[in-house]
Image: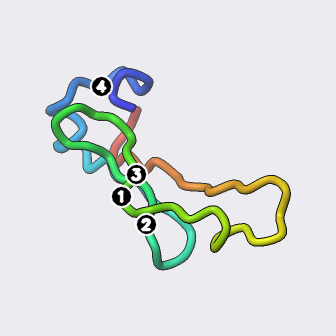
Amino acid sequence: VAKDLGLQLPEIRDRGVRIASEGRTHYFALHGKTGHLVTAERIDREQLCEGVQQCVLRCELVVEGEM
C-alpha cells in the first residue's frame, strides 16, 4: 500500500492511513512496519458468502490530508 501510494513508511503513521470496511468486522489491516495490506481476521468464505458464486469483500483506504 505504501509503495502504491508513493508514501514512505513513516508517512503511513503520520498521515493517519487506515483501512475502513463495511460492517462491524474488520477483515483487513495495514501492517505498520511494512506498509502491507494484511488479513486481520480469519475469513470464512462459506459463512460470508453462502450460496453466492462470487465472494467479494470491500474495504477502503483512508488517507488524511492532501495527496
> Depth-wise, is mark 4 or mark 2 nearer the camera?
2
Q: Residues within 10 Å of mark 2 (few under 14, many from 20)?
A: some
Count of numbered labels shown in the rendering: 4
Figure check: 51 above or below 4 = below
| Amino acid tagged 3 | Thr
| Amino acid tagged 2 | His
- Say what secondary structure mark 3 lies in: strand
- C-beta proximity under 8 Å, tags 2 and 1: yes
**Mark toward the start of the polypeptide (3 vs 4):** 4
Please provide percent x and percent y for residue 31. 26, 43
| Amino acid tagged 4 | Leu
| Residue receiving disc 2 | 26
> Depth-wise, is mark 3 or mark 4 nearer the camera?
3
Please provide percent x and percent y for residue 15. 25, 43
| Residue receiving disc 4 | 7
> Residue at 43% across / 66% down in the picture?
26
**Disc assigned to residue 39:** 3
| Residue receiving disc 1 | 40
- Closer to us: 25 or 48: 48
Q: For residue 49, which quarter of the picture?
A: bottom right
Q: Residues within 10 Å of mark 1 (few under 14, many from 20)?
A: few
Q: CA distance from mark 2 to mark 3?
A: 9 Å
Q: Taking 46 as reference, is 38 left or right?
A: left
